[in-house]
Image (cartoon, helix red, strand yellow):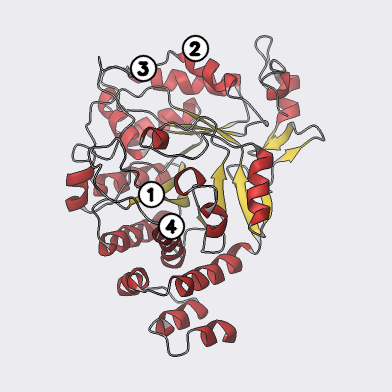
Amino acid sequence: MSNLLERFAGSPLLSIAEKVAENRRLSFDDGVALFKSPDVLGVGALANHVREKKHGNTGYYNVNRYLNPTNLCWVDCALCAWARKPGVDGGYTMSIEEAVAESAAGWHDGITELHIVGGLHPSLPYSWYLDLLRALKARFPGVHLKAWTMVEIDWIARIAKKDVAAVIGDLKHAGMDSCPGGGAEIFEKRVRDVICRDKISGERWLDVARLCHENGVKTNVTMLYGSVETVEDRVDHLVRIRKLQDETHGFLGFIPLAFHPEETQLPDVPAATGLTDLKVIAVARLMLDNVDHVKAYWVQIGEKLAPVALHFGADDLVGTVTEETITHAAGAKTESGLSRTEMERMIRGAGREPFERDAFYERVVRDPLGRVLRANRHDFEACLSAAPAGPPVHPSSLDPALASS
């Protein structure tokens, strides 16, 4: 601790460093000061101190697959280059069978999580969302279904003409294990009026997240930075997350997302710099003292910068994210997916120790061939022996071209 404070002797950040050393909560003004500080390495050192106290030298990742069953969406967000209106070229909607087949076709390395998000489809019935979850859970038992953002759950409840809490219960019963954190963007109304005017308010997003947590569904939470927000807007966003986490303890992790302006309605907004990417991650780690995990999303910030982020407060590089499409529609130049070996190489390159996690941050157990034996508190071998006759349910039982390597 003395070494940490020595680093900030005579620095404007000394009072903040003292709070960090003493495990005291940072204030709104502290967050603004951190964002405005030119000492990026100093901010990173403070964040790394907290990160290593929480997670040591561990660098988490998981083997997941993205599934975007539809990109049709009635809202018109200035930040989005991916969604399409009905009848516009490039729009699509998968049937249940197609979505299950798409998930199987993307199988590699023994995936333990499906990350499912789509557009706010104007005409899909309520039953479609439940049936999709049931079909995926039946086909891939033991695989964690992280499905539907707070924005989507609010929309699904409107379709169903049901109370949001009841819808969360229905989705959970159908197989929804947790929820992704998308759609949070920046909670401040002034910003949302520019980047996502027709989307639910920041307050509504937090209300739906609260209902998820109260009904036993953990969620993630994001922040979209680098559009038209101020540093004060960013800190306000982090403080609101922290306040809800104090109340519910329902956020699994925080994911900062860099705004990619290409192909959006805001093409002239300068892209976030690498220094901004690192500072956002670092300040988030320092402000979100009650959120265990801060993630560096390599798809957004790049495969060279993501390992650096493991020394600026991040402890998790998210996952292999097979076939990511949303950020790439906005001009991302990263790969659309990485293998387990590539993820571990990236983490080791940062001097961290790779830890393949499941949705509960427990270690995934594999056999010598790399096939999953246990993940998400589920025995995959038991799943095989108990599986009914019909299509195989384990990646190692799929066509050899799809089996784990």
Residue under numbered circle 2: 97
> Callout 1 environment at 10 Å: few (<14), some (14 to 19), or many (20+)?
many
> Callout 2 environment at 10 Å: few (<14), some (14 to 19), or many (20+)?
few
Name the amino acid type tagged 3.
Tyr
Whole-Å distance between the Cαs marked 2 and 4? 41 Å
Q: Nearer the viewer, mark 1 or mark 4?
A: 4
- Of mark 2 and mark 1, the one earlier in the sequence is 2
Whole-Å distance between the Cαs marked 3 and 4? 34 Å
Residue under numbered circle 1: 258
User: Is the residue 288 above or below the residue 381 in the image?
Assistant: below
Residue under numbered circle 3: 92
User: Is the residue 13 above or below the residue 355 in the image?
Assistant: below
State if disc 2 and disc 3 touch (CB < 8 Å): no
Residue at 38% x, 28% y is: 118
Residue at 28% x, 24% y is: 84
Residue under numbered circle 4: 274
